[in-house]
Amino acid sequence: MALVALVAGLVAFIAVLRGLEVQRHAAHAVRTAQDAIGVIADPDLSDDVKERHVQRASLSLLKSFVILVAIGLAACLCATLFVAGGALFGLFSLDQAMATATSWPFILWSSVGAVALWFVFSRLGGRTGAANKEGATTREEVPYSTLDKALHNYAFSSPGLQISLSSIEDRLWRNKIAATRTGRPLLITSLPRAGTTILLELLARQKEFASTTYRNMPFTMAPLLWGRFSSMFRKAGEKAERAHGDGIAVDFDSPEAFEEMIWMAFWRERYENDWIGLWEATDRDAEFEAFLSRHMQKLVASTPDAQRYVSKNNASIARLPLLSAAFPEAQMLIPIRDPASQVASLKRQHARFSDLHARDRFAQQYMEGIGHFEFGAALRPVAFPGAPESAEGAEHVDYWLRYWIAAYEHVLHTAPEEAIFIDHVALSSRPDIQLPRLAEALDIHDRDRFLAASSMFRAPASPPRLPDASADLVRRANELHAALLERAL
């Protein structure tokens, strides 16, 4: 009976910890401590500011400590009640309970059982939460734990800390970074749903290219420092379909677009309205350009055999003149897709993410944190001349047609002459013809490996009809599409 009471006490102990959300309070304490460390390490802040922040952090940590102690005492009291109650009713003696509790088999199996119980309660809690949400899906679209979410939100809200961490790794890996020689950066950009993701995956498979991956999250601006730290907790995972529901499977080693976090850290004022501002060739910032250049170099340094940086950043079509002026050696790759197919896909993704964001607040926070303002509640259009000025009306196809026209008219007029345009439909339909041309244009080293990736591509379906669209907008979009294809490979 002593063993039964001890097991019941263990279950009660874990249940109280879960019920009183000890993990959430512990995560808050960790975030507070990290924030304080970031402020202390920030050379741009005065001692007075640092002192005030540390004082506030100390009070917050004291509060968290008291809460955690109270939760721990409550859990211990619940567990003790089972043992003390059994002894009080004469079912066993306290000496018997103590002898059982201190025996090595009980210590071993109770430790294993406690861990198992924690995960069981976590899964039950997740299922209950999902069942209580109307329309919730069984697919885990945002596969992050509470602690993961807290860490991501902290990283998203602390660009100053990220820049400070980057400065620390500049010093720690000074020799390695200095010894790394990089070739021409390759910047992939276009409106979403134009085929930018498959181009990034194609190029990231080539040994000569280095790209950010999901393993760089959430401290993407410190790839060497965070990579070294996170490797101690590295997860292995099977590929799973991403939240877009477009059949593209990703895992922790899949390349992804995280470069926009750097732009937001240095150009925050461009994101403060319902739309995102444009960049001109005269908008030069030496500190930003040096930071992004080092970031490219660090990613190459962290990737064996790599010589070139490759990124996919849809928002970069808003800054082609600046990129050309600041990084004249960079190559720009701009895929072009027929407007009917792309507009239908944009509208469909907006509806999908609007639904997801209504059900999961963190999904919206995640997209906004990494600078993906393309869909759902996170939608903020780029301020192309003639584009919609807010997300209002985005449920209608004409909204996306107007946006498509405004975006690609801007691209047609501002893309540098040496920018490489590629027809997404032609590439998907005839990779045997298009891939050799692309390999030549990009000066790919291992042509055989590059051409062997033709199996990634599938011939697309015929462009859909847009029965609710304005005939004039459709005509203008098709004429613009034809002009863009004149520049394609």
Image: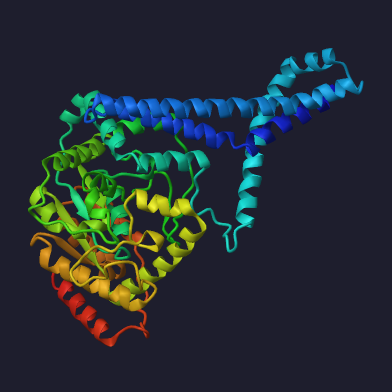
State the image coordinates of residue 343 (x, y, percent, origin top left): 32, 73
State the image coordinates of residue 36 (x, y, percent, origin top left): 36, 28
Would you place residue 13 above or below residue 395 in this image?
above
Would you place residue 383 above or below residue 7 in this image?
below
Question: 272 left or right of 95?
Answer: left
Image quadrant assignment for residue 246? bottom left
Counting every numbered tag in the picture gives 0
Of 216 and 57, which appears nearest the observer? 57
Question: Looking at the image, which residue is at 66% across and 25% down?
Answer: 73
Image quadrant assignment for residue 157? top left
Q: Quadrant of the N terminus?
A: top right
State the image coordinates of residue 144 (x, y, percent, origin top left): 49, 45
Could you tell me if residue 307 is visible in this image? Answer: no
Question: 207 left or right of 179?
Answer: right
Question: Looking at the image, which residue is at 22% across and 25% down?
Answer: 171
Image quadrant assignment for residue 214? top left
Question: Looking at the image, which residue is at 24% across and 30% down?
Answer: 45
Of 181 and 412, which appears nearest the observer? 412
Of 489 and 27, which appears nearest the observer? 27
Q: Quadrant of the C terminus?
A: bottom left
Identify the image's colour scheme: rainbow, by chain, secondary structure or one colour: rainbow
Would you place residue 168 above or below residue 122 in this image?
above
Could you tell me if residue 183 is visible in this image? Answer: yes
State the image coordinates of residue 208 (x, y, percent, origin top left): 23, 44
Question: 429 left or right of 411?
Answer: right
Question: Looking at the image, which residue is at 19% across and 37% down?
Answer: 294
